[in-house]
Image (cartoon, grey):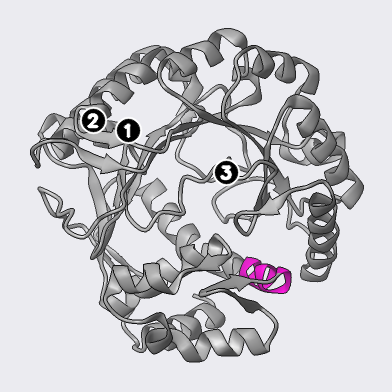
Amino acid sequence: MSLPITAARVWLTRGTAPFRFTPDYDHPLSLEGADPLGLYVHIPFCHTLCSFCPYCKVPYEEELARAYVEGLLQEIHLVGRTWTGRRQATSLYFGGGSPALLSHRLGKIVRALEEHFIITDGIGVELHPRDVTVDTLSRLKEAGVSRVCVGLQSFQPLPLQSLGRERPDPGVLGQALAAVPFDTVSADFIFALPGQTFDHLRRDILLAEEMGANHLAFYPFIDFSFTPGPNQGLSGREKWALLKELTAFLRERGYTRDSIWTFARTPGKGYSSMTRTNYLGFGCSAASLLKGQFKVNTFSIPAYLERISQQKLPTALTCRFTQRQRMVYDLFWRAYTTRISPGEFEACFGRSLDGAYGLELRAARLLGWMRREGEDWVLTDRGAFRFHLFEGHYTLAYIDRMWSLMGREAFPQGMDL
């Protein structure tokens, strides 16, 4: 594990204990204190497997997809029947994979979730560009979807060549999205690819707007150890220069930053499946974050289906947080949104943010990484870039190691991070 991450963990958690993951899990799950609550459903099927993508995915097969949906419905009811009535959930997101491959079945999944949850803030679905057709979009709309995110990666030949992806046609995409409108149309791009320039990104932005996007995401290219994707991307200095140009251009065009890597042109039209204080995940590889624990489902579809057939949760690993560890995990994702609310922190943990991390926040302000905006702490552009650097270390030290292990073993014996 990298020295910066280890030092940060020891300092921020005020202890040397690692994040310890074990194969045990709670059944039923305790949702005490898990409000507000988000929902996530993982659909692992793809048209083809992109070499750069680290997520849990397999090629689409009709029989396997049918069996997976039945297992998913069983998992939803297995969790949902542990309480009476319906719990409130702020949002529901389908990720993958390419969830729209199951567009004809998403309505059935949504209805199963609505037996146990009242979804108050919309439903989002990730889309591969080839799934942006009037027929597919209409089925998603009928299922209750209000937000879509199109995984474009780029419109430009050079970045797409390094990713092994075909160029999407913005005109074709725009016609379908105009015929079947959604509240949020987010365009997903990969940032800091080998050879990528600001001109590439500028043209991507203009084409995304032509397509009808009102939200843009620029996720950093990360060279995972288990993906045979492109070679190492841009250097830190090149990323900082590129990010400054990108951010300035987006502000000129009327966008506001609503997370480290995302920008909204229309207020309240963001798209994010992970910036939730608490959430429940369903499906293989899906994670759940609750008040005292973080758990991850098995990455193996056969193992997932076998465990569900036994009426057991498909949990592979669970981390039971100390309070400090939970605070740090929560602050990480609050910082990802670029805004930390002391009131929300105190409501969640029963202690003041200043009492817990006042020294660190004041130091960040002195360094020019954060500023006060009313009662809130807000990341500056320089702070957002520093977060990007930290996130890169975090991803390779934690996510890369965990996903590598879980890609090899359906139910690992445990690990320390």
Give the residue type that dot 1 points to.
Ile
How crowded pointer 2 is (Cα within 10 Å; few <14, some 14-19, many 20+) is rated as: many
Q: Quadrant of residue 166?
A: top right
Name above or below for residue 169 compared with residue 90. above
Specify whether residue 181 is in view.
yes
User: For residue 61: magenta?
Assistant: no
- For the residues bearing labels 2 and 1, Cβ distance under 8 angstroms: yes
Residue labelled with disc 2: 305
Image coordinates for residue 286, horizontal then vertical, percent:
35, 44
Name above or below for residue 150 compared with residue 9. above
Element type at mark 2: helix
User: For residue 383: magenta?
Assistant: yes
Residue labelled with disc 3: 270
Image coordinates for residue 121, horizontal then vertical, percent:
41, 38
Q: Tell me the distance, in whole angstroms, between the alpha carbons under discs 2 and 1.
A: 6 Å
Q: Tell me the distance, in whole angstroms, between the alpha carbons under discs 3 and 2.
A: 33 Å
Q: Quadrant of residue 234?
A: bottom right
The image quadrant where one finds the C terminus is bottom left
Q: Tell me the distance, in whole angstroms, between the alpha carbons under discs 1 and 3.
A: 31 Å
